Image (cartoon, rainbow, N blue to C red):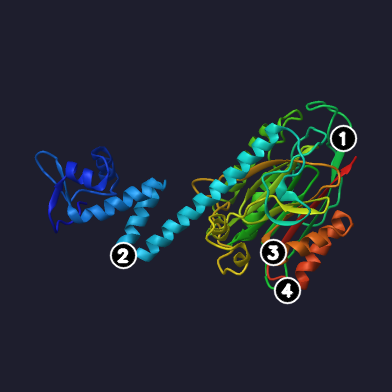
Amino acid sequence: MPAPVSGPMLTIGDFARASRLSAKVLRRYDELGLLPPARVDPFTGYRYYAVEQLERARLIAWLRRIGMPLAEVGRVCALYGSDAAGAARAIRGYWARVESENAARRDLAASLVDRLKGPTEMTDETTDGTTDGPTRGVTDEATRGVTDGMTRGVTHGTTDGMSTAGAGAAAGMAGPPAFVLRTAVRLDRGLVRTAQQDAAHAGPHLLAVADGYGPEGERAALAAVGALAAAPPPAPSERAGDVLNALEDAVRAADGAVSGLAESGTTLTAAVWTGGRLALAHVGDSRAYLLRDGAFVRLTRDHTVVQALVDAGELDPAEAADRPDRALLLKALDGGDVPPEPELGVHETRPGDRYLLCTDGLSAVASADDIRRALAAGVGPDEAAGALVALVRGLGAPDNVACVVADVVPA
């Protein structure tokens, strides 16, 4: 409906010049209901705008300049009329998502650069000690191998087994495995929660953890991990890019498996082992870590409002853990109309590497130093996973815990 007229009128040309929006764009915004003219001449169809509409027009122009989709622009404009503070929060939330997505793209681009340069030593971000922040990717001399695909089935207890696929003499060639994964998984309800809403899987070629939320959180987490585990296996000669594509498709399938669960969803962090590489997909605030030669490195970036504020330099990392909104997710699998884009990466492996995938029931409760010490205790994956659960229980275990520990060992 046209806006009420309560002041001087401007022709569409004058209004376009004043608002810095072209007449073509103004006609488009009229069609969408974003900025209808104050009056339309019934005979000529010519549009006239009220001077007071300039403020809304400029707001729309600024929101479009930062890349906000038109649907969100409409919601912000609707809020602005009655709740300016709410409109400001909506803009801040949108920009936090943009910062998070840009950070994920930056990490993926850096990972691609590292891979194209060829095998190198660990980057400066993975020096000795603990780094509680995502790296751009780890590359190293490693035997390149093949995979016979993702295993099927979801593990809900503890496993400790060896993978049966590894590296051949050359990529795409079958042969005895050079390295295998020794894995273990632990689930614990914690000391406060009455239900277990986490899920985990530790198979020969697929590692995954999921943290469900909402009234159907348990079903969401199990559905996501189950869908990922049931994904068609990639061909033995598949290249790293093809494995990532298959993994991304599997995450989309996992998002579809969560649809229909009212007000519920889940995080998902998963890795596919190919004998010489670990392909990683991540959505939400569960995490993946690498322990290598004493260096403890986070491989994923939390998709949360707090992490986006840290990335944007608006929040000190030391303050993030104490924020009441630290678990407010920017990305999750919720079966919505548009599946979230997972953070993807490929990490070269070497014998002696130990990987940890965990939900925030561990990472948000225990410090990075404590987690590193538990992982570096010189015990096998099963004992390490048990030590991590014991660590959280000693700290009160306020949330569910799921963790997967995987060691790269000679076959």
Q: Earlier in the sequence, mark 4 or mark 2?
A: 2
Choose top left, top right, bottom left or bottom right for residue 368. Answer: bottom right
Q: Secondary structure at mark 1?
A: loop
Please report the residue visible at 83 percent of the width from the left and 50 percent of the height from the top.
293
Tell whether 98 sits left or right of 375: left
Q: Where residue 13 appears, x then y in whole percent?
A: 18, 41
Mark yes or no: residue 248 visible.
Answer: no
Q: Which mark is residue 82?
A: 2
Q: Earlier in the sequence, mark 4 or mark 3?
A: 3
Q: Earlier in the sequence, mark 2 or mark 3?
A: 2
Alpha-carbon span between mark 2 and mark 3: 39 Å
Alpha-carbon span between mark 2 and mark 1: 65 Å
Q: Secondary structure at mark 2?
A: helix
Mark yes or no: residue 177 visible.
Answer: yes
Name the foreground residue: 116 vs 219. 116
Q: Which mark is residue 361?
A: 3
Q: Which residue is mark 4?
A: 396
Q: Which mark is residue 177?
A: 1
Q: Secondary structure at mark 4?
A: loop
Task: Tell me the crowding category of disc 1: few under 14, some 14 to 19, or many 20 or more residues within 10 angstroms, Cα based.
Answer: many
Choose top left, top right, bottom left or bottom right for residue 320. Answer: bottom right
Alpha-carbon span between mark 4 and mark 3: 11 Å
**Image mark count:** 4
Q: Secondary structure at mark 3?
A: helix
Under mark 1, the amino acid is: Pro
Q: Earlier in the sequence, mark 1 or mark 4?
A: 1
Tell whether 244 sits left or right of 172: left
Please report the residue visible at 26 percent of the width from the left and 37 percent of the height from the top.
24
